[in-house]
Amino acid sequence: MEQTTIAQTLKQNNARAVAKLVMVMAIIMTIALVVNLFPTMITVMFLMAPAVIMNVGWLLFSSAIGA
């Protein structure tokens, strides 16, 4: 029973500190995610651009032939 009392005491005394720590960790994780995804998304956009252009071209071609 001693452990549950310690857990309750920690929960009551350190709630504000834990909330602050969670917020700081969430901000750090968000910044790390953006820093890691930014170069990746640029690369993905360059790789996807030709496929998108070709698909648009095929749609225009098929609409011109089908009409």
Image (tube, grey):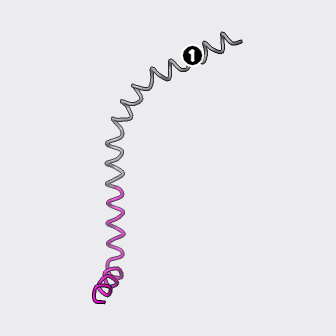
Question: Height in image: 30 above or below 40?
Answer: below
22 magenta-colored? yes
Q: Is 4 in front, or is 33? A: 4
Is 2 drawn above or below residue 22 in the view shown? below
Question: In the picture, residue 45 is in which quadrant?
Answer: top left
Judge whether 6 appears above or below 66 on screen. below
Q: Which residue is mark 1?
A: 58
Residue type beneath disc 1: Trp
Q: Nearer the viewer, residue 52 or 31?
A: 52
Residue 58 screen position, x and y as percent: 57, 16
Q: Main secondary structure of the magenta part?
A: helix
Q: Is residue 36 above or below residue 6?
A: above
Q: Residue at coordinates 60% horizontally, 18% vertically from top-left?
A: 59
Q: 67 left or right of 34?
A: right
Q: Residue at x 33, y 53 (%)?
A: 29
Horizontal side of 27 relative to 63 (left or right) equals left
Q: Please name the residue shown 32% across and 42% down the image.
A: 36
From the top left corner, tell me how far across and down residue 61 is, in percent. 60, 12
Q: Secondary structure at mark 1?
A: helix
Q: Which residues are magenta?
A: 1-27
Tell me the quarter of the image containing the C terminus: top right
Q: Quadrant of residue 27?
A: bottom left
For image coordinates 31% across by 81% down, the residue present is 10
> What number of labels is visible?
1
Q: Quadrant of the N terminus?
A: bottom left
